Image (cartoon, rainbow, N blue to C red):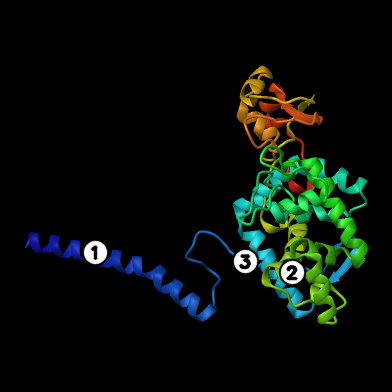
Amino acid sequence: MKKQTKINYILTLILVFCIGASIPVLTGSSQVTEQHSAKSEVPYCVTSPTVPAQVTFDGETIDLRRYDRRERMDREMMAFTYMHSTTMLLIKRANRYFPIIEPILKANGIPDDFKYLMVIESNLNNIARSPAGAAGLWQFMPATGREFGLEVNDNVDERYHIEKATVAACKYFKQAYAKYGDWMAVSAAYNAGQGRISSQLDKQLASHAMDLWLVEETSRYMFRILAAKEIFNNPQRYGFLLKREHLYPPIPYKKVTVSTSINDLNDYAKSQGITYAQLRDANPWLRDTSLRNKTGKTYTLYIPTQEGMYYDPKKTEAYNKQWVID
């Protein structure tokens, strides 16, 4: 009898436990069905970023209310918002490169917003190289780089030289602007080529490059620039919470000019107190283990300082205060 009572007691406990465990499930199911609850089964929230009614590019107001512009902008804003690691890395790198790029754009009369073209061209990776052979922050093809004054060969490739490549890009922008008189058309031409944009403007009887029917890459290109600007100007709004210490500071260098050949850059780097890898990182336009300089051309090498290489993240300054939360 006692044994049967014990068994009944255990069965009662199991029944009570099962009923108790099922109540939240039943209740939750009822809430989802009857009240359309927004509760999610995954431990994070995904929402679509709000598309602004308008944006500006070099002071020009671009209306985004029309369906095609709105949806193209929406696509690029979602891409930047949810490519979390890539977008965070862009902001971190911008703290190092924007202080170099902005003064060059200004000195050459190019709108500051063109730095966002550089962002989408290379992801701010100074050693970026596309499958087609475009290289550097501005992704110049070899022939275009030479056309705008860069030395490009298997020993020296100035497409990877930040300052010189930026000056070359400015020359291209000014040349294209002289043709179009519109900076957004200039940006489209940078991707598709001036010949194609000119011919399509004529064929399609369009007054604005953003209204052209183009291959998808170029069609997205202009809106990617605008989306990058929007995200960079409002990173917290789109979920990117960075502190100053997360950003990459500019690395201080000493400049050394050379007008002769350097037979072994490994030995040269060691004589400067750095490694060959550090020399190449500071001067990615060097493309070999030697610098052949038969013409006696003067090159400037950047040698990172020891203090700079061991920077303290706690002392990093934000180039743009909007990027950080502290």
Residue extending farthest to the left is 1
Q: Quadrant of the C terminus?
A: top right
Which comes before the other along the chain, label 1 or label 2?
A: 1
Q: Position of residue 154 (x, y in %)?
A: 66, 41
8 sits to left or right of 284: left
Looking at the image, do the residues carrying marks 2 and 3 touch, with CB atoms under 8 Å apart? no
Q: Could you say whether the residue bearing mark 2 is in a helix, strand or loop?
A: loop
Vertically, is 203 above or below 155? below
Who's the residue at 24% across and 64% down the image?
A: 14
Q: Compare residues 81 and 213 and report the one nearer the observer.
A: 213
The residue wearing badge 3 is 47
Bin the neighbour count of mark 2 within 10 Å (Cα to Cα): few under 14, some 14-19, many 20 and up. Answer: some
Who's the residue at 71% across and 72% down the image?
A: 72
322 sits to left or right of 216: right
Who's the residue at 67% across and 69% down the image?
A: 75
Q: Compare residues 255 and 48 and report the one nearer the observer.
A: 255
Residue 6, disc: none
Looking at the image, do the residues carrying marks 3 and 1 touch, with CB atoms under 8 Å apart? no
| Separation (CA) of disc 2 from disc 3 | 12 Å
Which comes before the other along the chain, label 3 or label 1?
A: 1
254 sits to left or right of 306: right
Q: Position of residue 210 (x, y in %)?
A: 80, 72
Q: Compare residues 235 and 265 and report the one nearer the observer.
A: 265
Residue 51, disc: 2
132 sits to left or right of 7: right
Q: Position of residue 22 (x, y in %)?
A: 35, 69
| Separation (CA) of disc 1 from disc 2 | 54 Å
The residue wearing badge 1 is 14
Q: Position of residue 296 (x, y in %)?
A: 80, 28
Bin the neighbour count of mark 3 within 10 Å (Cα to Cα): few under 14, some 14-19, many 20 and up. Answer: few
The amino acid type, in three-letter code, at marker 1 is Ile
The amino acid type, in three-letter code, at marker 2 is Val
